[in-house]
Image (tube, helix red, strand yellow):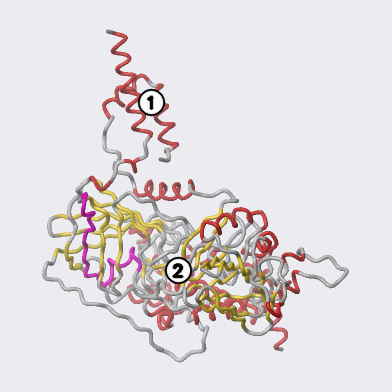
């Protein structure tokens, strides 16, 4: 049973105070539930959540639906695990530092071999564990294929391979063992694994230029990668081909696929790249927010506003309290700038 | 004997300190009988009827402790957004549900062998949301668990008053004209029964959109003849529009927000809401403000 540290320190103080001892004797056995103000109750709820905060290396398993689970780590992106008789399939592998704990978490779900890793995009917090985790896997080989794999197969859109590798003679950003072993360059790739169809759908020019969403058709779960997160504004990686229009289009595609069970809740579950397990209604709020912000900035761009003028207009004010940040790797200012640069370039090209 | 007296006191003190260390959760709430809330409850609309039934006016933010972010959200809100397919079948979240057409049923879930109370459940007529209030001391889920319209609620008795704490709510609304309630909110509620009358007190603590807790009450009367009808909802295409269009007003371009203060003679500044508009002393400030008609000229 977990001890309440505040109660422990209070109890210690009472023991030392002779005068308070009689009061304690009199109050021994009094009901533990007493009236509290609502603000105190709300603060207690928040403090309880704070107490449960994990260290950065903890990895938690959340069963989602059907064959699918979500792994949540303190750092790094969420991982999707699909497990069944044929083996284990992962969507993304988080950061390298979490790999041991990720493998432990996978083993708590299934002891079958890891056959596939699908990468939703190229960022290190989603592909960092590729090499150590794929090494522990075993793709099924044989026949005309021979034995091309050195562990699990790693699938991704070909732009992910382009960005992880480098031409001969140049230093690649990632080690060879982490590169995708199988790529696709069309709109989609299909798999059938553990009794269900799995659709890997390319979302062009979105978070990056190599984004995929993964839909587990029978389990009715969709892995969105960083196209949908519940923690921040979406990162628009301009250097790697990301655009705000692409992110919004991808969210609309997710809404097309997702079907809620009843009263806009449940049904298709969506695993975000970061944050909590979600469903269509959560993706809808995010899509609405980004569309509204895009429209506001677009209107300012049309009126000839500079970036500073756009920032001064505070086009994200009503969402900053929920998704904004003033510090860290992705701030509100960076988000506004990325959207502005996207839309300003589009505006100048259309003239 | 003097030494024995001191030792007895020390021993009792130690025992009391040990019991004080144990968290409150060690006392199972289910042991408390509380005051039975079960039954069919019909809503009463003598309080806030115009807002709850026909609906609030666009731009009426009176009496709400909202911040600038909430104002912008509401100023941008266009009711047409509810025609989007994904918005059509949303129920009221649990903090708003008692406000609407809210014929209510409450029932208990009892553990058969021990006859201990496990949970209360509610069903409300509009969009038929059902909610569980866990009374067995279980903890709230972790942050990464899914949020729902009804949230995750735990309850405890404070005398004859049921106090509930709800987390894990989806993004919702405080007033049906675009005033939002974020998914970071924690909602505290009290259910108080006086014979055949039930008062439902809802206190919303939202760090994103409110500057202080927002409190409102709703009343019900016991109605043993009540029969709540089902409430199916099917999505239809109400408006033919390109995919991805989200109806909203650009900042500063929603002229409808000016109509409410002008129609009712409310100073425009007052209609913008804020915590001070909740309190009676605001009437003294109102007397110093220009009336809405002159402000609009």
Crowd around label 1: few <14 · some 14–19 · many ≥20 (10 Å): many
Q: Earlier in the sequence, mark 2 or mark 1?
A: 1
Same chain check for tags 2 and 1: yes
Report the magenta residues as a range: B93-114
Compute the Cα span from label 2 to label 1: 50 Å
Residue B11 x %, y %:
33, 20
Q: Is residue B83 left or right of residue B8?
A: right
Residue B258 vs A324, above or below: the answer is: below
Residue A18 vs A132, above or below: the answer is: above
Residue A168 x %, y %:
86, 71
**B56 magenta-colored:** no
Number of dots carrying numbers: 2
Foreground pick, A131 / A15: A131
| Label 2 sits on residue | A65
Residue A218 x %, y %:
47, 76
Foreground pick, B103 / A29: A29
Crowd around label 2: few <14 · some 14–19 · many ≥20 (10 Å): some
Residue A14 tag number: 1
Residue A240 tag number: none
Residue drawn 52% across the image and 75% down it: A216
Mark 2 lies on a secondary structure that is strand
Q: Quadrant of the C terminus of chain A?
A: bottom right
**Chain containing the residue with disc 1:** A
Residue drawn 33% across the image and 46% down it: A37
Foreground pick, B112 / A145: A145
**B101 magenta-colored:** yes
Q: Quadrant of the N terminus of chain A?
A: top left
Q: Is residue B175 left or right of residue B107?
A: right
Circles 2, 1 touching at the beta carbon (< 8 Å): no
Residue drawn 42% across the image and 66% down it: B170
Q: Residue furthest right?
A: A169
């Amino acid at each position: 049973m977990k001890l309440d540290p505040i109660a422990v320190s209070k109890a210690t103080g009472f023991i030392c105070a002779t005068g308070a001892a009689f009061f304690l004797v009199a109050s021994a056995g009094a009901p533990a539930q007493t009236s509290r103000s609502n603000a105190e109750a709300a603060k207690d709820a928040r403090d309880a959540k704070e107490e449960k905060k994990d260290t950065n290396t903890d990895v938690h398993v959340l069963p989602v639906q059907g064959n699918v689970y979500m792994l949540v780590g303190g750092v790094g992106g969420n991982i999707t695990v699909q497990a069944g008789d044929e083996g284990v399939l992962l969507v993304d592998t988080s950061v390298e530092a979490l790999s041991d704990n990720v493998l432990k978490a996978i083993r708590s779900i299934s002891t079958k071999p890891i056959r596939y890793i699908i990468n939703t995009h190229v960022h290190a917090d989603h592909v960092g564990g590729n090499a150590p985790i794929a090494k522990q896997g075993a793709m099924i080989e044989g026949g005309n294929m021979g034995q091309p794999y050195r562990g699990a197969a790693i699938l991704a859109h070909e732009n992910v391979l382009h960005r992880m590798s480098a031409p001969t003679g140049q230093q690649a950003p990632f080690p060879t063992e982490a590169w995708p072993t199988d790529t696709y360059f069309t709109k989609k790739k299909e798999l059938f694994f553990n009794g269900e169809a799995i659709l890997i759908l390319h979302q062009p020019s979105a978070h990056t230029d190599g984004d995929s969403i993964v839909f587990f058709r029978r389990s009715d779960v969709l892995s969105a990668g960083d196209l949908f997160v519940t923690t921040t504004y979406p990162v628009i990686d301009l250097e790697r081909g990301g655009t705000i229009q692409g992110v919004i289009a991808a969210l609309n595609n997710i809404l097309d696929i997702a079907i809620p069970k009843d009263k806009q809740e449940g049904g298709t579950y969506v695993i975000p790249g970061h944050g909590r397990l979600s469903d269509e209604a959560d993706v809808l709020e995010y899509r609405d927010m980004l569309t509204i912000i895009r429209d506001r900035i677009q209107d300012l761009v049309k009126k000839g506003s500079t970036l500073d003028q756009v920032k001064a207009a505070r086009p994200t004010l009503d969402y900053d309290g929920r998704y904004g940040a003033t510090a860290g790797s992705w701030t509100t200012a960076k988000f506004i700038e990325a959207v502005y640069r996207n839309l300003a370039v589009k505006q100048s090209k259309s003239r | 004997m003097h030494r024995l007296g001191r030792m007895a006191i020390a021993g009792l003190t130690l025992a009391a300190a040990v019991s004080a260390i144990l968290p409150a959760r060690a006392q199972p709430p289910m042991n408390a009988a509380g005051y039975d809330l079960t039954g069919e409850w019909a809503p009463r609309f003598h309080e806030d009827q115009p807002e709850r039934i026909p609906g609030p006016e666009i731009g009426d933010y009176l009496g709400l402790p909202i911040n600038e972010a909430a104002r912008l959200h509401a100023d941008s809100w266009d009711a047409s957004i509810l025609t989007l397919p994904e918005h059509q079948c949303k129920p009221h979240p649990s903090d708003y549900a008692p406000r609407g057409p809210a014929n209510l049923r409450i029932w208990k879930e009892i553990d058969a062998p021990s006859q201990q109370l496990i949970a209360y459940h509610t069903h409300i007529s509009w969009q038929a949301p059902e909610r569980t209030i866990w009374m067995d001391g279980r903890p709230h889920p972790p942050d990464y668990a899914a949020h729902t319209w009804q949230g995750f609620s735990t309850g405890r008795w404070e005398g004859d008053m049921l106090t509930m704490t709800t987390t894990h709510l989806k993004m919702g609304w405080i007033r049906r004209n675009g005033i939002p309630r974020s998914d970071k909110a924690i909602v505290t509620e009290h259910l108080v029964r006086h014979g055949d009358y039930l008062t439902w007190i809802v206190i919303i603590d939202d760090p994103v959109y409110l500057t202080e807790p927002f409190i409102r009450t709703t009343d019900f009367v016991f109605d043993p003849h009540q029969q709540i009808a089902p409430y199916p909802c099917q999505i239809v295409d109400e408006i033919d529009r390109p995919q991805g269009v989200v109806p909203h007003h650009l900042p500063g371009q929603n002229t409808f927000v000016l109509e409410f203060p002008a129609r009712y003679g409310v100073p425009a500044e007052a209609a913008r809401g804020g915590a001070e508009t909740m309190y009676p002393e605001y009437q003294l400030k109102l007397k110093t403000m220009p009336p809405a008609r002159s402000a609009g000229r």
